Image: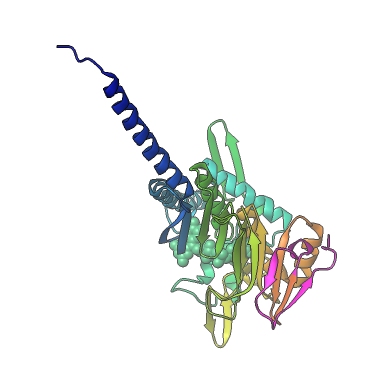
């Protein structure tokens, strides 16, 4: 017998539909009103501790974003590391007198490194590899080399000999005869930029990418306030800041001699080299910070400004008024570019903040 729908049945269906609709709307409203939660991932990569934090209302979205970010880090490390024999950088370094075929990302990063080497008159030199290897700072073979060894290594430091070429689908890289490319001073910044891009493309609105002190934030804090990022006090334990910067969608990078070094006969030898001497840079700066949306640029420029020392760094900043920078000197003075006045707050009352002349707006 066919089922006959009565008026009473219709009412029952209508009531059920209303209940379902209310439940679905309620769940959706609950989801929309829920505050995003923080999801974290921490691991050892790029020779440092990598910390990723994303905020999301959806655990699945957060888990996928974190997993994809970690996979991207592993891939970039396999391309850029000078310590992995099969990396693009190592293959270019061992292809003496020949080109090596590399990924589009390695070619892009290399071009950026050369651009910054030109911009800084070679204070940042991505062909520094022979000097880095000779001193071995940060490894268990760290030592003070003989002057003759330093002179020999220095002959192999000249970014102008590095060549990149784009032929059809192919990217080619040549380090120049015998030179050793080392992207340790820029690659973390480049990777942070790519990770922030990846997180945005996954729909993440708030995130912090911390690649061993190389910080990049996505968006603002979940409630809309800017992120507050601290700048490490070189004389205090890790996590103690002398200043805090309020930023959104930006990167805060600091370089200094206080983390990777060794001591011999009471002298401290650190990992930022002066490409004109082949020795750790004798800077009057304790650290250099750059705040910029382009973290690769910020990373490489911090290293370069540290090498330059305060006077030359100030000149550079006057000539590049778009840059936002903090120079901390050995005697505890904090020199800032004028554009940071409203962005930066000092946490350490014993320090003095001075605006670099000629960078006022
Ligand atoms: P920065 O000031 O940003 O850079 C200093 C580094 O840049 C030096 O360590 C040197 O590599 C290079 N450099 C020094 N002087 C100059 C100069 N004048 N111009 C240009 N470059 C210069 N560390 C490990 O211990 N083991 C690893 O296996 C390892 N793998 C890594 C793989 C990758 C892809 C990357 C990006 C880094 C890796 N590191 C590893 C860390 C690396 O060796 C550097 O110590 C690190 O990148 C330095 O970053 P920083 O922010 O401390 O200093
Ligand atoms: Mg750097």
Residue 9 vertical placement versus 250 (above, below): above
Residue 131 in view? no
Across and down, in percent, residue 250 comes to 62, 55
- Foreground residue, 37 or 149? 37
Give how far across and how far down residue 184 sits, in percent.
Answer: 55, 60
In this view, 52 is above or below 344: above
Q: Which residue is painted at 53% across and 82% down in the image?
A: 263
Does 351 lie within the magenta span?
A: yes
Image side of residue 300 versus residue 211, left or right:
right
User: How many marks are shown on the rendered structure?
Assistant: 0
Residue 217 in view of the camera: yes
Q: Is residue 311 above or below residue 46?
A: below
The quadrant of the picture showing ligand 1 is bottom right
Q: Residue at x 73, y 63 (%)?
A: 340
Q: Which residue is drawn at the image coordinates 62% and 45% (left, top)?
A: 163
Position in image of residue 215 (x %, y %) = 56, 60
Give residue 20's position: percent from left, percent from top. Answer: 34, 35
Q: Residue furthest left?
A: 1
Work out which quarter of the rendered image holds the C terminus and state it.
bottom right
**Residue sitting farthest toward the right:** 358
Q: Residue furthest bottom?
A: 266
Position of the N terminus by quadrant: top left
Q: Which residues are magenta?
A: 336-361
Query: Between residues 245 and 288, which one lies in front from this camera angle?
Result: 245
Query: Any magenta on residue 40?
Result: no
| Colour scheme in use | rainbow
Q: Nearer the viewer, residue 85 or 282?
A: 282
In the picture as drawn, the residue positioned furthest to the front comes out as 8
> Looking at the rendering, which quadrant does residue 122 occupy?
bottom right
Q: Which quadrant would residue 24 be assigned to in this image?
A: top left
């Amino acid at each position: 017998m066919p089922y006959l729908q009565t008026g009473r049945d219709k009412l029952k269906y209508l009531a059920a539909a209303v209940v379902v609709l209310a439940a679905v709307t309620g769940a959706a409203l609950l989801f929309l009103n829920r505050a995003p939660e923080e999801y974290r991932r921490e691991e050892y990569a790029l020779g440092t501790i990598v910390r990723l934090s994303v905020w999301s209302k959806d655990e699945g979205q957060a888990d996928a974003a974190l997993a994809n970010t970690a996979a991207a880090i592993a891939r970039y490390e396999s391309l850029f590391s000078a310590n992995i024999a099969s990396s693009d950088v190592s293959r270019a370094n061992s292809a003496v007198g020949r080109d090596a075929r590399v990924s589009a990302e390695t070619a892009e990063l290399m071009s950026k490194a050369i651009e910054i080497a030109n911009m800084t008159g070679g204070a940042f030199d991505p062909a520094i590899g022979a000097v880095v290897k000779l001193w071995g700072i940060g490894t268990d073979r760290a030592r003070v080399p003989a002057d003759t060894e330093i002179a020999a290594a220095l002959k192999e430091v000249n970014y102008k000999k590095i060549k990149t070429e784009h032929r059809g689908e192919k990217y080619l890289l040549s380090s120049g005869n015998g030179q050793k490319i080392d992207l340790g001073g820029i690659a973390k910044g480049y990777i942070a930029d790519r990770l922030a891009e990846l997180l945005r493309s996954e729909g993440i609105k708030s995130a912090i990418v911390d690649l061993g002190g190389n910080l990049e934030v996505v968006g603002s804090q979940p409630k809309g306030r800017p992120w507050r990022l601290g700048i490490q006090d070189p004389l205090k334990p890790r996590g103690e800041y002398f200043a805090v910067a309020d930023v959104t969608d930006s990167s805060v990078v600091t370089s200094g001699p206080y983390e990777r070094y060794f001591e011999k006969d009471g002298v401290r030898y650190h990992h930022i080299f002066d490409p004109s001497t082949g020795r750790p840079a004798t800077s009057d700066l304790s650290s250099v910070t750059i705040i910029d949306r382009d973290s690769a640029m910020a990373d490489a420029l911090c290293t370069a400004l540290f090498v330059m020392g305060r006077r030359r760094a100030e000149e550079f900043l006057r000539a590049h008024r778009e840059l936002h920078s903090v120079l901390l000197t050995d005697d505890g003075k904090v020199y800032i570019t004028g554009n940071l006045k409203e962005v930066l707050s000092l946490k350490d009352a014993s320090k003095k903040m001075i605006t670099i002349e000629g960078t006022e707006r």
